[in-house]
Image (tube, rainbow, N blue to C red):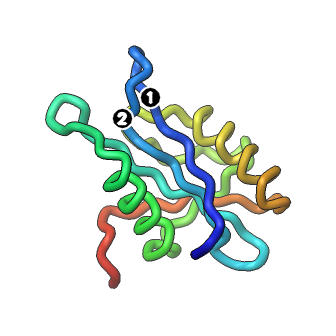
C-alpha cells in the first residue's frame, strides 16, 4: 500500500463532512484527491469518503491542476481553495516533493 496522508474537511460545528487524501502519483508528483458529502442529504462515512477520494486520485490522473498558490483551482463545493493549499503544504513536507496537483474526477470506478 502506498503511503498516504489525509485531512478531514469539517463544517462550522467541527463535524467531518469530507476528506482530502494525498499520495505520490509518480516519483516526482504528489496528488490530492477530495471527497465531500452533500451535508443536507448524506451522512459522512469516513471509510467510504477515503475510498472515494483515493479512487479519484488513482483513476482520474488526467484531470490534474497544479496547487501552487498562483493557479486558480476549480471549486469543490464547500471546500475553500485555502484548505486545499494548506493540505498541499503538508503534503509537500511529508513527501519532500514540491510538485503537488489536485486531481478531480466524478467516479471511483476504474476506467
Residue 4: which quarter of the image? bottom right
Residue 27 located left or right of residue 84 = right
Q: Is residue 35 left or right of residue 94?
A: left
- In the rendered image, the vertical position of residue 102 relative to residue 72, given as above or below: below
In the image, which disc is placed on residue 10?
Answer: 1
**Which secondary structure lies at badge 2?**
strand
Which quadrant is home to the N terminus?
Answer: bottom right
Query: Residue placed farthest to the bottom in the image?
Result: 111
Q: Position of residue 17 (x, y in %)?
A: 36, 35
Where does label 2 land, which residue?
17
Question: Crowdedness of circle 1 by 10 Å Cα count: few (<14), some, many (20+)?
Answer: some
Q: Quadrant of residue 25?
A: bottom right
Q: Earlier in the sequence, mark 2 or mark 1?
A: 1
Q: Residue at x 67, y 51 (%)?
A: 67
| Structural distance between the alpha carbons of marks 2 and 1 | 5 Å
Q: Residue at x 32, y 55 (%)?
A: 48
Residue at x-position 75% and y-position 44%: 89
Amino acid at each position: 500500500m502506498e503511503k498516504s496522508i489525509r485531512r478531514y474537511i469539517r463544517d462550522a460545528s467541527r463535524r467531518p463532512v469530507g476528506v482530502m487524501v494525498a499520495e505520490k502519483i509518480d516519483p516526482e508528483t504528489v496528488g490530492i484527491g477530495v471527497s465531500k458529502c452533500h451535508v443536507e442529504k448524506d451522512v459522512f462515512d469516513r471509510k467510504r469518503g477515503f475510498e472515494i477520494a483515493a479512487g479519484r486520485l488513482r483513476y482520474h490522473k488526467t484531470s490534474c491542476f497544479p496547487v501552487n498558490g498562483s493557479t486558480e483551482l476549480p471549486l469543490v463545493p464547500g471546500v475553500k481553495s485555502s484548505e486545499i493549499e494548506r493540505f498541499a503544504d503538508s503534503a509537500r513536507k511529508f513527501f519532500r516533493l514540491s510538485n503537488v496537483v489536485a486531481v478531480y474526477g466524478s467516479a471511483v470506478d476504474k476506467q
